């Protein structure tokens, strides 16, 4: 079985693949202070609950694929693979790893690994042209050409960052639950803030995606828009441009990159 690990700035998502099927997944907080040994204990606790895996760390795991936007966590996970999974092929997404997606930006090395992995999965699952909207710590919009090339994107503050900023900077405001309010016109402060977040981000998505699609294809209707990320469900019902919701897009991309590199190891 293949273990995939997507380390984001706020949360880390793990997925277990049996062939092309994801059979289990977990979501934990990202803590850059965790050591390799602490991460190994965390993995053992999570995977020890799955019936297809053995009692020892690594039992039943025959491959590992990792991407991380937090360098310190990537360093510790590299140590985890060396010390605890020494006999298991591991692919860590970094410069030099074969993805199959050309990166047509000014400096390809500065593009987040997760964004490239999302593009890999988008090309495989939906083809190009496509736009991936990832609702994470930041809301990222990534454009893939009809030829399957990563051509650039947009980065905006994420939903949780915006909620936190309102609570901290607003003298009479507080941090709220991110939820859909009863109506667009809030009847109290909490609902007014919720409306601003939910409908404000839906409007942002519609506006940014529409402008990107005009640049990406002669016919904007040819562009497939894929939503992913933990907070995507909050916007799905309100956005008019999202065509597909793929919550495990990054994990699927990691599986694909693993398959494209493991034969070279």
Image (cartoon, rainbow, N blue to C red):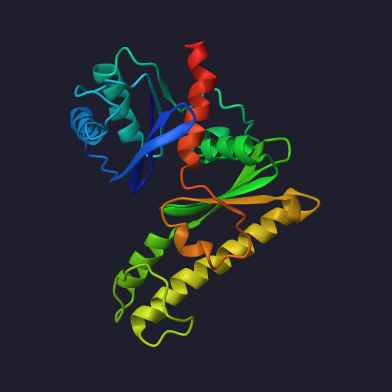
Where residue 169 appears, as percent x and y from the top left, is 33, 72
The residue most toward the right is 218
Indicate whether 29 appears above or below 91. Answer: below
Question: Of residues 33 and 232, which is closer to you in this image?
Answer: 232
Where residue 148 appears, as percent x and y from the top left, is 68, 35
For this view, does 163 lie left or right of residue 48? right
Q: Quadrant of residue 25?
A: top left
Where residue 195 appears, as percent x and y from the top left, is 45, 76
- Please give the name of the residue rendered at 45% of the width and 53% of the height, measured from the top-left corner: 138
The residue most toward the front is 51
Q: Is residue 216 visible?
A: yes
In which quadrant of the rendered image does the N terminus lie?
A: top left
- The image shows a total of numbered marks equal to 0
Indicate whether 224 appears above or below 94. Answer: below
Indicate whether 3 appears above or below 190. Answer: above
- Please give the name of the residue rendered at 76% of the width and 49% of the height, measured from the top-left corner: 217
For this view, does 244 lie left or right of residue 190? right
- Please give the name of the residue rendered at 51% of the width and 66% of the height, measured from the top-left corner: 201
Indicate whether 1 appears above or below 70. Answer: above
Where residue 105 appears, as percent x and y from the top left, is 63, 38
Q: Is residue 105 visible?
A: no
Question: Of residues 169 and 69, which is closer to you in this image?
Answer: 69
Q: Quadrant of residue 212?
A: bottom right
């Amino acid at each position: 079985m293949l273990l995939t690990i997507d380390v984001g700035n706020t949360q880390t998502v793990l997925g277990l693949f049996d062939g092309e099927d994801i059979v289990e997944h977990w979501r934990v907080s990202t803590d850059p202070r965790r050591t390799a040994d602490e991460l190994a204990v965390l993995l053992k606790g999570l995977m020890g609950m799955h019936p297809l895996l053995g009692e020892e760390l690594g039992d039943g795991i025959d491959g590992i694929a990792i991407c991380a936007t937090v360098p310190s966590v990537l360093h510790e996970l590299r140590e985890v693979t060396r010390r605890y999974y020494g006999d298991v092929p591991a692919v860590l997404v970094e410069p030099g790893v074969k993805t199959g997606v050309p990166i047509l930006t000014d400096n390809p090395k500065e593009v987040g690994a997760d964004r490239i992995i999302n593009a890999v999965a988008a090309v495989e699952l939906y083809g190009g042209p496509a736009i991936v909207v990832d609702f994470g710590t930041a809301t990222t919009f990534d454009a893939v050409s009809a030829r399957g090339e990563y051509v650039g994107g947009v980065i905006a503050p994420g939903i949780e960052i915006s909620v936190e900023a309102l609570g901290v900077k607003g003298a009479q405001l507080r941090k709220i639950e991110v939820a859909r309010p009863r109506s667009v016109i809030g009847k109290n402060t909490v609902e007014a803030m919720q409306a601003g977040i939910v409908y404000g981000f839906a409007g942002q998505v519609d506006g940014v995606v529409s402008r990107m699609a005009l640049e990406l294809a002669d016919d904007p209707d040819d562009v497939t828009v894929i939503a992913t990320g933990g907070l995507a469900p909050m916007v799905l019902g309100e956005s008019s441009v999202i065509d597909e919701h793929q919550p495990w897009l990054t994990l699927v991309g990691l599986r694909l990159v693993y398959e494209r590199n493991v034969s070279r190891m």
